[in-house]
Image: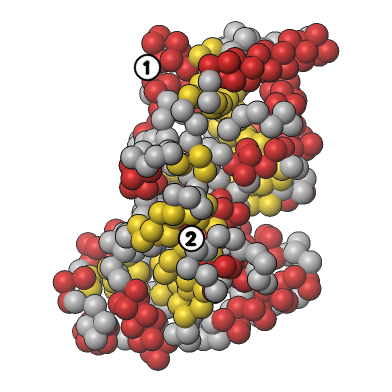
Amino acid sequence: MSATHLKVLFEQAVPPDRLLLDERTLAAYARDMTEHPPGRPDIVIQLTTFDEAKAVVGIARDNGIPLIPRVAGTNLGGLSLAPRGGAILDLTGWKKIININEVDMIAIIEPGVTFRQLVDVLQHKAPPLTIGIPLSPPHTSIMANCLLDGLGNRSLVHGAMGQWITGLEVILASGQVVRTGAFALSDVPFSRSPLPDLTGLFVSWQGTTGLVSKMAVELKPRLPLRKQVFILTYDRHATYELMRRLARQNLFDDIAGLSWPTGKMLYGVAKPLWKDPDEPEFFTYIDMSGSSEAELQVKETAVCRAIDTLKKEQDAAIEDPLDLRTLCAVAPEFETFAEFPTDLDFLTKTPGGGLSWVGTYGPMSRFDMAADEGIGIMARHGFPPVIVSRPMKGGHFGVLRFIETFNREDAAEVENVRQCNRALTDMVLDHGFIPYKTPAWSVDRLLGRMHPGTHALMRQIHHVLDPTSIMNPGHWRLDVEEPK
């Protein structure tokens, strides 16, 4: 379909100045930061209202035009690219905080609302509230992170961000509008239960089942006092055992382990491949909050006791906790971790501009084996072992993420990242880990191992909700023949 025809079609729904067709814009929307092949859209549509979105979906349905939602574009792996052309729906301007219910601790928001935007509003509420905030740029979309089942700085207690959703309003490919959870009956969308949990039809589906127009999300109390500490550990396996033990104590807001290359990258080393034997293996970060200094002291004492016990049992090389404020006084680079949301310049603004990762959820009992093998894979491909590890939901599962930075303009380096990520994906699947925010390139690897009944049911659901495959086609590959 010609650009002129597309513009005429969508001018029925959106003002012409928000229908972008120039080559420079289309090229900018054709890539993300990863090794994923470009996907050039035919048009970019900047949406700002529900009525515009509903009209655009109707036009796309009638004309078989693919629709690809996008907000910040920071989700990696081609999820907001257009492999089959069509229309990118830029949702950054559709950003109203519709309601904050301070008593029931629920916010209702539109797709473009960012973590920075909501946090700024919540800071002025009394009593103060907060939301789980990911280690990602402040302009990241809350809705995108929740619908892709990402994580935040309170996931240790509350789990992945998809579980924070209490209800959705969704525009289906047919044009039908549905609401899920208590949102279907109540003006206070307090929970996904007790109705049948239809919210799951739109979480982790990569936008292939409908366009979400509103989301109700839980807020949490923000206690008045906070303390953050770093623990330097010199043995990876002792680090993981410490994480497992601390996660079970139900005392902390967040625990995260960052492998040694991240420290060097904070200081500007683009590709740290060598570690001094005297350097720590991991920087373990613990975030805790409380209503009094005495409460914080109890929590810090629990950390110290767990460290002392592990030292005695395993002769583990672990240092005592270092207060983040003290650390920042001598190493200001660690200010990155002092407040969320935060910029991650040491990852997102590296030479060459490429960033990719294989991020997984899986059993913490297998962290050690998977990390060992992952480090070997990264070494064979010439990448420093940048690893982020986190316990989730009280330690019931955890995050194991392998990260690469690279030069997007170097074809050989891009191919090396592809090969490395494929090997990492196969390895983590062998150990029972599952990629989250599933990149388009990894789907075949998952489907090849998925229970056949599960795959068949997913295909059936997709066909009911989007029979003509206009919603972010090419992701989850549910619109192609089932693999034999």
Residue 405 visible at all: no
Residue receiving disc 2? 216
Q: Give above or below for 177 relative to 271.
A: below
The residue depicted at 43 percent of the width and 66 percent of the height is 214
Residue in the foreground of this view, choosing between 243 and 378: 243
Amino acid type, residue under disc 1 in the picture: Pro
The image quadrant of residue 307 is: top right
Q: Is residue 160 left or right of residue 72?
A: right
Is disc 1 placed on a helix, strand or loop?
helix
The residue depicted at 60 percent of the width and 83 percent of the height is 463
The residue depicted at 52 percent of the width and 70 percent of the height is 186
- At label 2, counting other C-alpha atoms closer than 10 Å, the crowd grade (few under 14, some 14-19, many 20 or more) is many
The picture places residue 351, in percent across and down from the top left corner, at 35, 35
Image mark for residue 332: 1
Image mark for residue 379: none
The image quadrant of residue 162 is: bottom right
Residue in the foreground of this view, choosing between 102 and 184: 102
